[in-house]
Image (cartoon, rainbow, N blue to C red):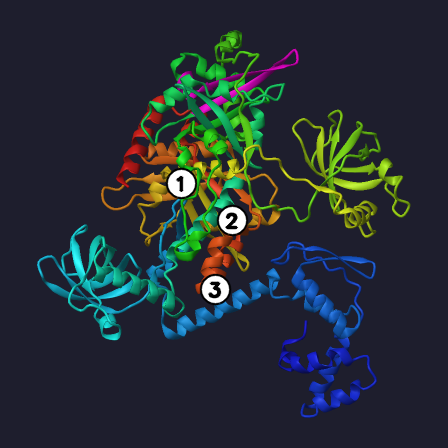
C-alpha cells in the first residue's frame, strides 16, 4: 500500500501508473513533478516502479469482503473475488497491462473489504469521540436508549387505504356542535378524510361531529364559504404537551355543495400529489412487514400442522414445511412413508388442549420409535398424560431417552381461519386496480375446514437428552409403556407436506434429465447403480437404487457412460463432485462440482449442452397440486404465530439486532420486554444484547454459515426479579457462558432460591438468503413513483439482513429435565404468571 507521506500525490501516481513501461515515462514524470523537491521525486518514482512489478499472488477474498465471491480465471490461475473486486482487477490490468503489485493492492483495498471498513469505522469513531470531547457533549441517556431498541414488526398487520392521502398543511377553522370555533392545521388530506393539529386544551370526544371550513382554499379557489364540510372524529391522540391530533372521516355527502367539494379535492390531489407528496406510511409499513415475514417463514424450525374440522371430527390435513422443519415432518413418517401425525395429534389430545385458557394451550410431547420385523412403531406421551399416570413419568422419560429416536417437542395449539389465507392489503388510488388474485373455488374448498394449527417444535438436544438418561426406572416395567404405543393401522388419514413458496435462491436453473451414472467413493469402491434426476453446470441430483453410506461433505467421482457416447470433446469419467445433501432414505444425493485449478470437464460439457439445447430441455420446477396453497397457509400461519422472531443486520463490520417481530399473540418475552422503557413501536432489547452477544457470538456463527446450513441452537436463561414499584429487573445469560451442565443447573436453582422467576428460551439462528423482491415489488414500485429515496432506504434495510432467529419459551421443559421438584415448578409457574399479567 502506498506510504502515508505519498498519499497527497496519489493523483500523480494514478496519472503515470499506465506509462511506467513506456519510452516517454521519464519525460511525463519530469513535467508532472517539476515543482516537487528531488527527494520526493525519487520516492514517487520508486513507488511507481514498485507498483508496476509483476505479481504472482493468488487473490482469495472468501470471508474478507461484503459480497458474493466467485472463481475468476486469469492466465491459468483461479482467483476468488466478488464483482467489485473483479471490476477493480480488470481496470488495473487495463491500466498496468499485466497483473502487478498495484493491481493486487487495489483489489485488496476495495471499499467493501472488511479490513478497510473496520479501519474507516474506527477512524470515524475516533473523530466523533474527539469532537464530543472538544464540544463537551457527553452521550445522553436518550441516545443509549435508542441503541438498545429494535423495531417491533407486527406480522399480518397491514393498513389499507381505499384512496390516496396527500401531505398538505393549511390553516382551517373547525366548528363544534356547540357553535364554538377554533383554528387548526391540516397535516394530510384525502377525499374522505383528513388529519388536523390543534391546541391540546380544546376538549374533543371521539365519534362526535365537527364542521371544517377550508379558509385558505376558499380564498384561492371558488368554494362555498357559508357551510362547513361535515366530519366525524375517529381518533384523538396527543402529539406533545401543547398539541393534539384529530383523525377525521367525512360524513355522508349527498347535497350539491358536498359533491362539488368531493370532486374538487379529488382533482386537487391528482394535480398536486407530486408537488406535496403523498402520505406513504401504509405502503412503507407493508414493505417492512411483508419483507420481514418472508425472511422468517422459510427459516422457521417449527412445523405448523393444520387441523381440519369436518362433521364434528378433527384430523391433521397438511403441514407447511421449510428447510429447517422438514426433518420434523419426516420423523413422523412410518416405514411406508405415511404420516402418523393423525395418530400423534389425536382428537382426544386436541380436545384437552382446547379446554385450556387461550394463550396457555401448549404442552410437551415426548416421542420415540421402536423398529421390529421391518415395521416402525411410534410411542408418544404429553406432559399431562405422564403426570396422570403415577410411576410412569421416569420410566417413559428414562427409557425413551435411551433410544436414538428420542425427541421432545414443544406443542402449541393455535386457532386460525380460512379468511386469513389472503393478504388483506391494498394500495390506494389507481394502484388499487391491480388487485391481487382471489382464491380459486378449489382452494377455498381445501382451506375452509382448517380451524386450528398445531405448532410442533423439536426442542431436543444432546445435552438435554443426557439429563433424561440419568433418570432411574424399573426396567422390568417397560412393557407398561405399551399404553403409549400407537397401533399399526391399515388406513391412515392423509396428511401432506406443503413446501413454503419462496424466492428461487439457486444461482442457475436445473434441467430434468435421466441418464446412467456410475458412482465411486473416495476409496474408489463402486456405489449402487444410479441415474441422474436433474443437472446444471455446477451440480447434479442423483438417485441410487439402494442406500449407501454417504454423508454431506464426501467427495465422490462419477462416470457418465451414455453421455460420453455423444461427446468426444470432453472426458466424462472420474468427474469429481462434492456431496451437498443426502435424503433421509440415503438414496438421493445433491452434488456440486469440485473446483480445482484445472477446468472441470463435466461443468464445461453441461454448459455447452444447455447452450445448444435450451429450447429442448425442461426446467425442473416443483409441481403444485393446489395453486396458491403454500402462500395461503403461510398467511394463516403468520396470523397465528406464537414465537419471537428477530433479525440481525450487518452494518459495515458490525452486526446489530434492529428488528424483532410478533405474530398473533405475544410470547412471554414480548410481554417482559414491553415492561422496559422504549419508544413507540419499539422493544427494549438491552437484556438480549448484553455481553456483545450479537457481535461476538451470533456474528461469528453467521460468518461461518451458508444459507442452506441448518440453524445453530442456543439457550437463553432470563432471571426476572420482581420489584414492588417500577419495571422488574431482567438479567440474561446464554448457555455458552457455563462450562458444564451441572453448572447450569446450579445457576437455575440459585434463581429459584432467590425467589426470582426463571424463563428459558431456545434460540434457532439461521443465515438468510437475499430478500424476496417479487413479494414486495408492487409496493416498492408504488413508493418509488413518489419517493424513490424511501424505496431505496427500504431495500437497503432488507438487503442488510444477514441472519434470522426465533426464540421459543421452553421453561417447563427445562425445569422438568433438571428434576426441579413439582412444588418448585408450581411456584415458578405462579410467579411467571403474575409477572406477565403486570404488563
Tell me the residue at 38%/20% (across/down): 351
In whole angstroms, how far apart are the C-alphas of marks 1 and 2? 19 Å
State how many labels appear.
3
In the rendered structure, the answer to whether residue 371 lies left or right of residue 127 reads right
Quadrant containing the N terminus is: bottom right
**From this viewpoint, which residue is outermost toward the right?**
568
Please give the range of residues in magenta. 364-386
**Image position, residue 268 (x, y; %):** 33, 67
- Badge 2: how crowded within 10 Å, few (<14), some, or many (20+)? some
**Image position, residue 629 (x, y; %):** 51, 35
Which is nearer the N-term, disc 2 or disc 3? 2
Asked if residue 756 is positioned above or below residue 123 in the image, the reply reads above
In the rendered structure, the answer to whether residue 475 lies left or right of residue 209 reads right
Is 371 part of what is drawn in magenta? yes
Image quadrant where residue 55 sits: bottom right
State the SS at label 1: loop
**From this viewpoint, which residue is outermost toward the left?**
178
In the rendered structure, the answer to whether residue 798 lies left or right of residue 63 reads left
Point out which mark residue 775 bears.
2
Point out which mark residue 447 bears.
none
Asked if residue 811 is positioned above or below residue 425 in the image, the reply reads above
In whole angstroms, how far apart are the C-alphas of marks 2 and 3? 18 Å
Quadrant containing the C terminus is: top left
Which is nearer the N-term, disc 3 or disc 1? 1
Point out which mark residue 663 bears.
1
Compare residues 533 and 644 and report the one nearer the observer: 533
State the SS at label 2: helix
Asked if residue 283 is positioned above or below residue 688 in the image, the reply reads below
Image quadrant where residue 428 sits: bottom left
Residue on which the image places disc 3? 788
Amino acid at each position: 500500500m502506498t506510504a502515508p507521506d505519498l498519499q497527497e500525490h496519489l493523483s500523480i501516481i494514478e496519472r503515470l501508473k499506465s506509462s511506467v513501461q513506456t519510452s516517454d515515462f521519464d519525460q511525463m514524470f519530469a513535467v508532472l513533478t517539476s515543482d516537487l523537491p528531488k527527494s520526493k521525486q525519487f520516492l514517487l518514482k520508486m513507488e511507481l516502479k514498485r507498483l508496476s512489478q509483476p505479481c504472482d499472488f493468488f487473490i482469495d477474498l472468501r470471508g474478507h469482503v461484503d459480497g458474493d465471491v466467485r472463481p475468476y480465471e486469469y492466465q491459468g490461475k483461479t482467483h476468488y473475488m466478488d464483482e467489485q473486486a473483479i471490476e477493480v482487477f480488470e481496470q488495473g490490468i487495463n491500466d498496468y497491462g499485466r497483473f502487478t503489485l498495484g493491481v493486487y493492492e487495489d483489489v485488496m483495498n476495495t471499499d467493501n473489504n472488511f479490513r478497510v471498513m473496520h479501519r474507516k469505522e474506527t477512524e470515524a469513531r475516533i473523530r466523533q469521540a474527539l469532537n464530543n470531547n472538544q464540544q463537551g457533549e457527553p452521550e445522553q441517556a436518550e441516545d443509549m436508549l435508542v441503541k438498545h431498541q429494535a423495531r417491533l414488526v407486527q406480522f399480518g398487520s397491514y393498513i389499507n387505504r381505499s384512496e390516496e392521502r396527500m401531505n398538505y398543511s393549511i390553516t382551517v377553522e373547525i366548528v363544534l356542535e356547540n357553535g364554538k370555533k377554533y383554528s387548526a392545521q391540516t397535516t394530510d388530506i384525502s377525499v374522505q378524510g383528513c388529519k388536523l393539529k390543534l391546541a391540546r386544551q380544546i376538549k374533543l370526544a371521539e365519534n362526535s361531529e365537527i364542521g371544517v371550513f377550508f379558509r385558505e382554499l376558499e380564498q384561492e379557489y371558488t368554494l362555498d364559504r357559508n357551510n362547513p364540510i361535515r366530519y366525524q372524529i375517529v381518533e384523538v391522540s396527543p402529539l406533545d404537551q401543547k398539541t393534539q391530533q384529530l383523525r377525521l372521516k367525512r360524513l355522508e355527502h349527498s347535497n350539491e355543495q358536498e359533491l362539488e367539494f368531493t370532486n374538487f379535492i379529488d382533482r386537487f390531489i391528482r394535480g398536486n400529489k407530486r408537488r406535496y407528496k403523498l402520505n406513504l406510511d401504509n405502503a412503507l409499513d407493508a414493505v417492512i412487514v411483508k419483507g420481514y415475514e418472508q425472511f422468517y417463514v422459510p427459516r422457521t424450525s417449527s412445523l405448523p400442522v393444520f387441523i381440519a374440522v369436518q362433521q364434528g371430527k378433527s384430523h391433521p390435513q397438511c403441514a407447511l414445511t421449510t428447510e429447517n422443519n422438514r426433518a420434523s415432518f419426516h420423523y413422523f413418517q412410518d416405514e411406508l412413508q405415511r404420516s402418523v401425525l393423525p395418530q400423534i395429534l389425536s382428537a382426544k389430545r386436541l380436545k384437552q388442549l382446547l379446554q385450556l385458557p387461550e394463550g396457555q394451550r401448549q404442552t410437551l410431547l415426548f416421542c420415540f420409535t421402536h423398529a421390529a420385523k421391518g415395521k416402525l412403531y411410534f410411542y408418544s406421551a404429553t406432559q399431562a398424560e405422564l403426570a396422570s399416570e403415577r410411576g410412569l413419568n421416569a420410566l417413559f422419560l428414562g427409557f425413551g431417552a435411551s433410544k436414538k429416536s428420542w425427541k421432545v417437542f414443544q406443542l402449541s395449539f393455535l386457532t386460525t381461519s380460512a379468511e386469513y389465507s389472503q393478504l388483506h392489503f391494498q394500495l390506494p388510488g389507481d394502484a388499487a386496480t391491480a388487485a391481487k388474485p382471489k382464491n380459486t373455488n378449489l382452494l377455498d374448498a381445501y382451506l375452509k375446514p382448517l380451524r386450528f394449527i398445531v405448532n410442533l417444535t423439536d426442542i431436543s438436544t444432546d445435552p438435554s437428552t443426557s439429563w433424561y438418561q440419568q433418570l432411574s426406572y424399573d426396567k422390568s416395567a417397560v412393557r407398561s409403556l405399551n399404553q403409549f404405543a400407537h397401533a399399526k393401522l391399515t388406513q391412515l388419514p392423509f396428511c401432506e407436506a406443503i413446501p413454503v413458496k419462496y424466492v428461487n435462491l439457486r444461482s442457475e436453473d436445473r434441467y430434468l434429465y435421466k441418464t446412467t451414472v456410475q458412482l465411486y467413493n473416495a476409496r474408489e469402491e463402486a456405489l449402487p447403480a444410479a441415474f441422474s434426476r436433474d443437472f446444471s453446470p455446477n451440480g447434479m441430483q442423483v438417485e441410487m437404487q439402494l442406500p449407501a453410506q454417504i454423508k454431506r461433505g464426501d467427495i465422490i467421482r462419477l462416470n457418465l457412460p451414455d453421455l460420453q457416447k455423444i461427446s468426444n470433446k470432453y472426458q466424462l469419467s472420474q468427474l469429481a463432485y462434492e456431496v451437498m445433501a443426502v435424503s433421509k432414505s440415503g438414496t438421493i444425493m445433491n452434488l456440486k462440482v469440485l473446483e480445482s485449478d484445472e477446468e472441470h470437464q463435466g461443468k464445461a460439457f453441461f454448459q455447452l449442452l444447455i447452450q445448444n439445447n435450451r429450447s429442448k430441455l425442461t426446467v425442473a420446477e416443483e409441481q403444485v397440486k393446489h395453486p396458491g396453497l403454500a402462500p395461503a397457509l403461510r398467511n394463516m400461519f403468520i396470523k397465528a404465530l406464537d414465537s419471537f422472531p428477530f433479525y440481525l443486520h450487518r452494518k459495515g463490520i458490525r452486526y446489530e439486532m434492529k428488528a424483532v417481530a410478533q405474530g398473533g399473540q405475544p410470547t412471554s418475552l414480548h410481554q417482559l420486554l414491553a415492561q422496559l422503557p422504549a419508544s413507540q413501536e419499539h422493544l427494549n432489547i438491552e437484556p438480549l444484547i448484553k455481553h456483545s452477544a450479537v457481535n461476538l457470538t451470533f456474528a461469528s456463527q453467521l460468518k461461518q454459515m451458508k444459507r442452506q446450513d441448518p440453524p445453530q441452537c442456543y439457550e437463553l436463561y432470563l432471571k426476572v426479579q420482581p420489584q414492588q414499584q417500577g419495571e422488574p429487573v431482567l438479567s440474561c445469560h446464554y448457555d455458552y457462558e457455563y462450562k458444564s451442565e451441572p453448572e447450569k443447573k446450579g445457576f437455575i436453582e440459585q434463581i429459584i432460591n432467590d425467589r426470582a422467576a426463571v424463563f428459558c428460551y431456545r434460540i434457532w439462528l439461521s443465515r438468510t438468503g437475499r430478500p424476496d423482491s417479487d413479494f414486495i415489488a408492487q409496493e416498492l414500485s408504488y413508493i418509488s413513483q413518489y419517493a424513490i429515496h424511501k424505496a431505496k432506504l427500504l431495500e437497503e434495510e432488507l438487503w442488510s439482513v444477514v441472519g434470522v432467529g426465533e426464540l421459543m419459551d421452553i421453561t417447563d421443559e427445562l425445569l422438568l429435565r433438571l428434576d426441579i421438584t413439582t412444588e418448585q415448578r408450581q411456584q415458578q409457574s405462579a410467579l411467571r404468571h403474575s409477572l406477565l399479567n403486570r404488563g
